[in-house]
Amino acid sequence: ELELTREQRRGMSDAIATGHDTQISYPKLLALLRGELTGRRAAVVQRAWQRLDRLKRGLIRVDELAAAYDASADPLVKAKSKTPLQVVQLVAGAFDGYGGDNTVSAAEFADYYSTASAFVQSDDFFGRIVASAYKVAEN
């Protein structure tokens, strides 16, 4: 069962009503449902960003992100469906897809984890994933 807030229902209705058909893509649906990162999730993502953006430029290179990302605790690695290198390449590739400019902004970083957050029910589990990947405190 999926419970939607009034704002989420309105967003879905508006998205469908402004289109020329009655279909909505899965990524667009997730974007409407996920909302913004809040609370503990936002805090751990912010700590990870601060660790990456040591020069406070508001922008890092994808290779800097890949070098700092530790995929050893990633669920795909633990399930042995991907190697750590494959996971790093997936993450780096996802960020490079934001603009193809080989950089990641703070907003792109938060957006990526906002989308990822939609797939993780537990705040604790989400915090552990992000904290272990970037070697920051969970809370």
Image: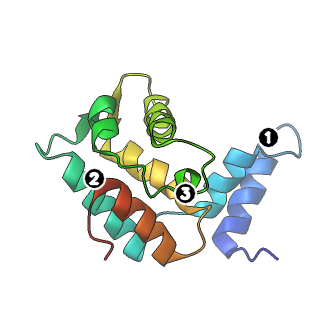
Q: Quadrant of the C terminus?
A: bottom left
Q: Residue furthest right?
A: 22
Residue flagged by tag 2: what amino acid is it?
Answer: Trp
Q: Which residue is mark 1?
A: 19
Residue shown at the point (67%, 75%) measured from the top left: 5
Please indicate whether residue 56 sits to the left or right of residue 88 in the image: left
**How crowded is the residue under tag 1: few (<14 C-alpha within 10 Å), some, or many (20+)?**
few
Q: Are marks 2 and 1 in contact (CB under 8 Å)?
A: no
Q: Quadrant of the N terminus?
A: bottom right
Please tell me whether mark 3 sits on a helix, a strand or a loop.
helix
Residue shown at the point (16%, 40%) measured from the top left: 57
Residue flagged by tag 1: what amino acid is it?
Answer: Gly
**How crowded is the residue under tag 2: few (<14 C-alpha within 10 Å), some, or many (20+)?**
many
Is residue 41 shown above or below 15? below
**How crowded is the residue under tag 3: few (<14 C-alpha within 10 Å), some, or many (20+)?**
few
Q: Which residue is mark 3?
A: 78
- State the image coordinates of residue 138 (x, y, percent, origin top left): 33, 72
Residue shown at the point (36%, 61%) measured from the top left: 132
- State the image coordinates of residue 70 (x, y, percent, origin top left): 36, 49
